[in-house]
Amino acid sequence: MFSYCLRRTLAAVPVMVVVALFVFLLLRLSPGDPAAIIAGDMATPEQLDRIRETLGLNQPIYLQFFNWGGELLRGDFGTSLMSNLPVTQLMVQRLEPTVSLALLSIVLSVVVAVPMGVIAAWKHGSLIDNVVMSVSVLGFSVPVFVIGYILIKIFAIDLGWLPVQGFKRVSEEGFGPFIRHAILPALMLSTIYIALIARMTRASMLDVLGEDFVRTAHAKGASEKRVLFKHALRNAGVPILEVIGTGFALMITGVVVTESVFNIPGLGRLTVDAILARDYPVIQGLILVTSGVYVLINLAIDLSYALLDPRIRYQ
Amino acid sequence: MATPLSCRFSMVRRRLLGGMAMMALLSTCGAISSLAAAPAEASTLRAVMHSGLRVLDPITTTAHITRDHGYMIWDTLLGMDDQFQPQPQMADWSVSDDGMTYTFTLRDGLKWHDGGEVTASDAVASFRRWAARDGGGQMLMDHVASVEATDPQTMTLTLSSPFAYVLELMAKPSSVPLFVMPARIASKSPDETLTVEDQVGSGPFKFIADEYDPGSRVVYEKFADYVPRDEPASWTAGGKVVNVDRVEWINMSDAQTALNALNSGEIDFLESPSVDLLPVLQANPDLTVEKINELGSQTIGRFNFLYPPFDDPQIRRAALMAMNQTDVLASLVGNPDHYSLCPSMYGCQTPLATDAGAPASLTEGGGTAAARQLLEEAGYDGTPVVMMQPTDAPTVSPQPVIAAQLLRQAGFTVDLQPMDWQTLVTRRASQQPPSEGGWNMFFTNWYIPEVWNPLVSPMLNGRGKDGGWFGWPDDPELESMRNEFAKATNAEDRKAIAKRIQQHAFEQVTYIPLGEYSIPAAWNNDLSGILHSPVPVFWNITKAE
């Protein structure tokens, strides 16, 4: 197992190098000039040249890449061209809102979607199954921002129970203020994942419920609950876990709409702002970190298969 | 009895999972136990500005949000009042009889946020940095023999040749005002942007570095040692009396979210609501919806003078005849309450306002036939007009669509190229031919104080490829008239010269002014004392508890 983990981790290194090179070149080849953005409307060509020189943007691309690579090897993601702050500081500042929101959303999704899927499979073809599938289709079909605005209208504006926007950090303000601000965005974000996980759970469960060992369990007199959750769900767990893991990675990298609707200062908005401002070091840092998160989550998913299904062993 | 191996693995797994669950539970409990009471916030003013603050140097950038930030933490030597008159702010001044020497004397009690005293050396270093970067400042420096601190309280500026706009340029509120910074900060190159550590001013608010989140949130606290002037506040002049302890600027990229936040009382002030959402705000009796920047903005179209077809003045005239402000403004703003037709290049509510040279069709429409005829006489060969259309900026995206249609009706071939605003900003700096990454026409907006006279308006710069603004008209006659304007001391003379300049600019079609608009701000009725000013300022405001 250890050597497997080590091999997988080392295999991530070339992936990250390719990502770094690709992102660097893509940014330099796409239109846009940070110097022009910083200088604004009244800059003359001479002033733009001087700003480019100050920022090191007039150096040959290969030199810029090696400079950046050198900094990376020292654990330094560089400095934002716009705010002059270290990229690491900017990412750390925005990490907690995104990760805590993604965690809350994924917990919410699992808690709601897995029982929904199990029940729908158990009562296959019944009214409950149809209702669960209809809700699932709705969750897939309605754009998340529409769901967000509906939630805001009901719970924040009409009922006045929750704030319409903003974010409070667990680390600074405690769990109460955090959950008050995060529950609506988490509901909005989890809608599509509830739909996805419920469908996946239902499909996996339907496959497993037709297996011999389930019939055997019934024949041995095991209760319905035990058969469903102890025997069937556990065997149906691998694809569900994969969806949950991938969903979590997607949440971390794809929460920009939710962050905009609820004005949450997370990584998604930092990414969009950096792209619009052509803030190269920030974009590069964010994409590298995101790639790293994907690699790690995929590794964690693979390793967790063995926990769920003892038949799976890694060489 | 020995436990089978498989069972032991199973137990280990259960414990592992149980342990993870317990850790999650404990961390949640820990989080709950750290619940803290919210700080008292009766005098905290929360505002959503027109954009997020990312660049902290108001000299390097012309971004308005950075200028607004500048007015929070830095002070200016002079201010400008609502009659466009320079007034003393940090300094009073006197002018020698021959008009060649200006002496600025700092008022007593000026302190930096870190405790030091403001001196004339700081003012001199700040003046030099500003003049190296600002277009008006550069023009002024062409006439300056020396600027020096003659004693700790006095800055003396000596001209080498007559220049009548020293005070106006030093007092101008936009887009690069002359903010006074400590000499150690102002001595940085204007091409090197200031950092968080450099945010030390002597203005009415202090920048709170620990709470700064670029593009998302900026926090200011009242500077207790700031001594405001005694005169009533007017634009950027007069007493900057701060009545709130703290101001927070929260950036909201979504217009609907900002509206909801204001309606629910989570924010107090919304600088720039979306026009189509204004009726919702106006329907709320707890809110005030009012214009604070009454001068508003001018929307303009600009040609590239270097390449066909707009290197030909007659073809530019055809384009001018084809345009009409009503169509553009109706598309851009919609509600006529918030826009006005204006044939003046200097804005219609300014001392130099004039309609000289503007064709009637610009405001009244109906110039298509004349445009067609001009185009035919010019021998237009169908060269496509590469028009840049930013699709991500609502205040500049409708103009190209309407303009393209108006030009097509007049017989132009238009190649409308969609792009994001930042690509446009980069591409417009290109002096390459349109087919090789250049362009023929783009649109932008200016605050009226940025165009209100021929010296500050970048579009009326005729210095060509070396030193001119994007589009690069090479127009020595225009430059000569601007120099004449710079030397005129009499108000009537200035007005007459400005009129001639506009007449000439319309003949050459240096650019096309496409009218004015001003969007109201909205705020909670708990706020009072909000100043009407071309720059949003946060002094003078009181928040009811």
Image (spheres, rainbow, N blue to C red):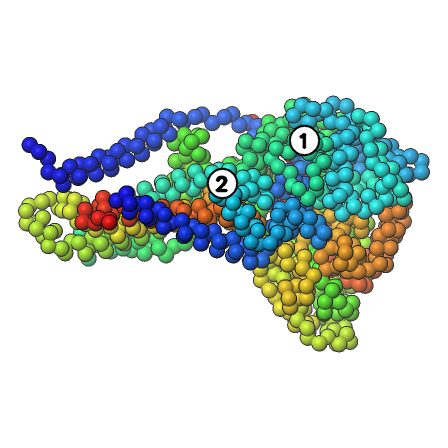
Q: Nearer the viewer, residue B490 or A169?
A: A169
Q: Residue A276 location, x and y as percent?
A: 55, 51
Q: Residue B368 location, x and y as percent?
A: 71, 70
Quarter that holds the N terminus of chain B: top left
In the displayed structure, would residue B51 be above or below residue B391? Answer: above
Query: Contact (CB < 8 A) between labels 1 and 2?
Result: no
Give the secondary structure at mark 2.
loop
Same chain for mark 1 and mark 2? The answer is no
Quarter that holds the C terminus of chain B: top right
Q: Chain of mark 2?
A: A
Q: Nearer the viewer, residue B273 or A188?
A: A188
Separation of residues labelled 1 and 2 (CA atoms): 35 Å
In the displayed structure, would residue B416 be above or below residue A99? Answer: below
Q: Which mark is residue B129?
A: none
Residue at mark 2: A74
Q: Chain of mark 1?
A: B
Apparent side of residue B451 relative to residue B500 in the rendered image (left or right): left
Give the secondary structure at mark 1.
loop
Query: What residue is shown at x 41% (from left), y 43% (from top)?
Result: A185
Inspect the image, locate mark 1, and give the three-letter code of the amino acid beneath it.
Gly
- Which circle, 1 or 2, is nearer the viewer? 2
Q: Count every numbered label the image shows and give the total.
A: 2
Inspect the image, locate mark 2, and give the three-letter code of the amino acid beneath it.
Arg
Residue B193, quarter of picture: top right
Q: Is residue A313 visible?
A: yes
Disc 1: CA contacts within 10 A as few (<14), some (14-19) or many (>=20): many
Q: Which mark is residue B201?
A: 1
